[in-house]
Image (cartoon, grey):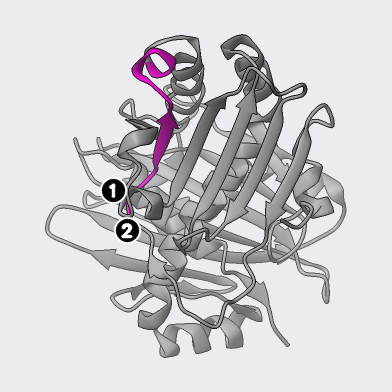
Amino acid sequence: MKKISLIVAVLFSLTSLYSCVDDKEKEIKKARSVGGTSEILMVTQNDEQWNGQMGQTVRDFFEVEQYGLPQPEKNFKVSHINLDALNDMFKKHRNLIIAKIDKDIKNPLVETQRNWLSEPQFVIRITAASPESWVRTFDTQKDGLKLLFDDNERKRFQDFFRPSTDPKIVAQLKNKFGISMNIPEGYGIGANGDNFMWLLQRHDDKDMSFLIYELPYKDTADLNPKNIIAVRDSIVKKYISGPLDGTYMTTDKEFIKSVSKSLPKFPAGYAVETRGLWNLVGDFMAGPFVSYSIVDPTSSKIITAEGWVYYPNKDKRDLLRQQESILYTLKFVK
């Protein structure tokens, strides 16, 4: 096995030994990975490990509620099988945690592997001398592991939508904003203003949208979370109206407050991610959104690209993950 790359290694504690098999293309194309959206399969040696502290620790971490959704939904669903049931089908699961207790091992061992037997796939193997040691090791790795499982989920959606990318929409984004983004077919233009575009896909029971807008960049204060929300509110109030006269979109500031975080490694460059809830002033429509604000490295402008969902009284996590995965394809082009 090859040593884990430096970029991935910084996600992990230095207390354990790592090894990793990278995901370079192989001559033989691998099978498509299996498993439900946002599902992790944990493989243990016996039911005692799953029902005890090891399984509970994994469930407590990955099954917390995803922030920014109007109804409670877990970040991931953790399923389980024992090692003796790990047949060829389960070995192709997209997200695997393989747990092992080996009393003869001196130091905990953490191994990661991409595309072991399928694509896209991420496998983490943790071996320790006792359940207590296993849990301690997992606790030092869990935040980095979540980032990697999140990335794997995005890759799955990107692979799915890439063949259906709409060339006309892509060309309009390039001409208007100097960006490329793999918007799939089925989206039309809901509004098109100065330095603004609203892409809308409407169904009988749900709407899915992308907003892209561009503003001058003066200094780092423009990426302050409060400023990002203030700009968002001014933009959507101007362009996104509701079905009733006088109604317009805004950002919810009471039920679910928006949260932001910096993403130094966003594909298009340094970005600020914002998650929260949108609603309509004067109406009862609402839903989750996720946005990314990025400074264009070739100009003094900020591009903000946002995805949002309207799907009343239904689960929205997977739809928002789809939007997020498409936003992660954003790149600046000449």
In the figure, 54 relative to 45: above or below?
above
Q: Which residue is mark 1?
A: 310
When asked about the image quadrant of residue 65, the answer is: top left
Residue in the image at 23% along x and 64% along y: 202
Looking at the picture, how far across and down is residue 111, in whole percent?
66, 42
Instruction: Tell me which numbered mark, 1 or 2, is placed earlier along the sequence.
Output: 2
Residue in the image at 46% along x and 22% along y: 254
Residue that sits furthest to the left in the current view:
204
Q: Report the side of 76 relative to 257 (left or right).
A: left
In the figure, 331 relative to 310: above or below?
below
When asked about the image quadrant of residue 55, the answer is: top left
Q: Which quarter of the image is occupied by the C terminus?
A: bottom right
Residue in the image at 83% along x and 76% along y: 298
Looking at the picture, how far across and down is residue 322, in whole percent?
40, 57
Kindly identify the amino acid type of the residue bearing the numbered disc 1: Tyr
Q: CA distance from mark 1 to mark 2?
A: 6 Å
Q: Which residue is mark 2?
A: 208
- Seen from the viewer's position, the closer of residues 120 and 233 is 120
In the figure, 252 relative to 135: above or below?
below
Give the residues drawn in magenta, as a range. Answer: 34-50
| Magenta region includes residue 228 | no
Kindly identify the amino acid type of the residue bearing the numbered disc 2: Met
- Note whether residue 117 is visible: yes
Q: Which quarter of the image is occupied by the N terminus?
A: bottom right
- Seen from the viewer's position, the closer of residues 207 and 129 is 129
Per the image, label 2 sits on a secondary structure element best described as strand
- Note whether residue 233 is visible: no
- Seen from the viewer's position, the closer of residues 286 and 103 is 103
Looking at the picture, how far across and down is residue 87, in whole percent?
32, 48
